[in-house]
Image: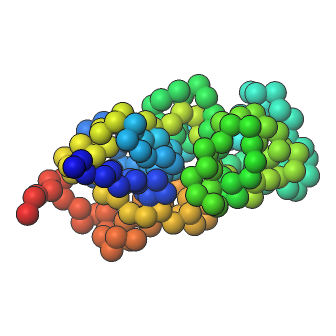
Amino acid sequence: MPLETVSLANHFLIAMPAMADPNFSRTLTYICEHNADGAIGIIVNRPTDMNLAGLFDRVSIPLEMDAAALRFSGLPVYFGGPVQTDRGFVLHRPAGEWQSSLTINNAMALTSSRDILQAMSSTGEPGDVLVSLGYSGWTAGQIEWELSQNAWLTVEADPTIIFDLPPEARLSAAMQLLGVDFANLSEVAGHA
């Protein structure tokens, strides 16, 4: 009988110090979907130089000048991962109803359709957002293999780390969920 895969959806992947891939070195990745076909995630601690006002301008969506929508203008756009870096993805809560969303749980979703950006610019909703260009993807069995190679630590995600902390504090906050200080992690992990 095959082993059942444990879903890591709604978990953080914490890159171990020895992570060789520069796309993932010192990253905190939120896993949006994980099943037998693979996994999808968004890096939540790697802001780019672009802010949302710049992104809205680039996609020709006017940002309304009221307080609700203006609060988004200075937020950074994140490097979500090396896959489809020309496409925008919005990790958000509440989940809501959008044209192209992946519902993660009853509170959060990942949306890639333009209608969410239009709502953000006009109504200031959804309340909590992280906008990325690109996402992180793993093929069937890849994330499990990487875990077996000690490339990552995993912990159940706390959305307040994503939405309430500055990007530079997110990795250490996720480590604290495990009771570990990132500075104390060794480059080499052993097997018992």
- Could you tell me which quadrant the C terminus lies in? bottom left
Residue 67 higher or lower than 138, as above or below: below
The residue drawn where x is 22% and y is 49% is 1
What is the basis of the colouring in this image?
A: rainbow
The residue drawn where x is 60% and y is 44% is 102
Q: Is residue 45 left or right of residue 21?
A: right
Asked whether residue 23 appears in the rendered view, the answer is no
Q: Is residue 35 left or right of residue 147?
A: right
Q: Is residue 145 left or right of residue 89?
A: left
Q: Is residue 114 left or right of residue 81?
A: right
Residue 106 higher or lower than 33, as above or below: below
The residue drawn where x is 47% and y is 62% is 157
> 159 or 79, which lies in front?
159
Q: Residue furthest left?
A: 192
Q: Position of residue 98 (x, y in %)?
A: 74, 43
Q: Position of residue 93 (x, y in %)?
A: 67, 57
Q: Where, by quadrant of the figure, is residue 111 drawn?
A: top right
